Image (cartoon, rainbow, N blue to C red):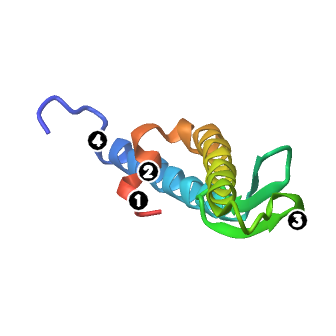
Amino acid sequence: MAGYKGGNAGMQNLMRQAKQMQEEMEKTATLLEDWEVVGTAAGEAVVVYMNAKKIINGIELDESVVDPTDIEMLEDLILAAINDGYAKADKVYEEKMGKFGNMGGLGGMI
């Protein structure tokens, strides 16, 4: 590396910092898996539970939205609750992983 004046100690320091950042990113990724996000629709008549990595863990429906003659409405409400949860998960993800810049996603590796 022409012009690099950090020497071996500088390279070791850089590698140590990269390792620390990787460890912090892994801890944050684990935190996102455990972070509960709740998406809602129709005044919480439809509730979707997921983590900040958008893995859905459960859905609750109030019986008031279950109309066998209008399945399309129920489907729309479920999608609305999922999209609400996804938007909230995106916000949490950006808050927690944004500090890592472009490395935060690692192409979906974490």
Residue drawn at (65%, 66%) of the image: 56
Residue topped by disc 1: 108
Residue topped by disc 3: 63
Residue drawn at (31%, 36%) of the image: 6
Residue drawn at (65%, 48%) of the image: 80
Q: Which mark sits nearer the N-terminus, 3 or 4?
A: 4
Q: Nearer the viewer, mark 3 or mark 2?
A: 3
CA gap between label 3 and label 2 equals: 39 Å
CA gap between label 1 and label 2 equals: 5 Å
Residue topped by disc 2: 105
Outermost residue on the top side: it is: 3
What secondary structure is found at the residue carrying circle 4?
Answer: helix
| Nearer the observer, 33 or 6 | 33
Instruction: Name the kind of residue labelled 2 in the image.
Output: Gly
| Position of residue 110 measured from the top left corner of the image (x, y, whole percent) | 47, 63
What secondary structure is found at the residue carrying circle 1?
Answer: helix
| Position of residue 16 measured from the top left corner of the image (x, y, whole percent) | 46, 52
Determine whether 32 is above or below 13 in the image: below
In this rendering, would 36 be left or right of 55?
right
Q: Nearer the viewer, mark 1 or mark 4?
A: 1
Q: Which mark sits nearer the N-terminus, 4 or 2?
A: 4
What secondary structure is found at the residue carrying circle 2?
Answer: loop
Instruction: Name the kind of residue labelled 3 in the image.
Output: Glu
Residue topped by disc 4: 7
Q: Are marks 3 and 2 in contact (CB under 8 Å)?
A: no
CA gap between label 1 and label 4 equals: 34 Å
| Residues packed near mark 3 inside 10 Å, few (<14), some (14 to 19) or many (20 plus) | few
CA gap between label 1 and label 3 equals: 38 Å
Instruction: Name the kind of residue labelled 1 in the image.
Output: Gly
CA gap between label 4 and label 2 equals: 31 Å
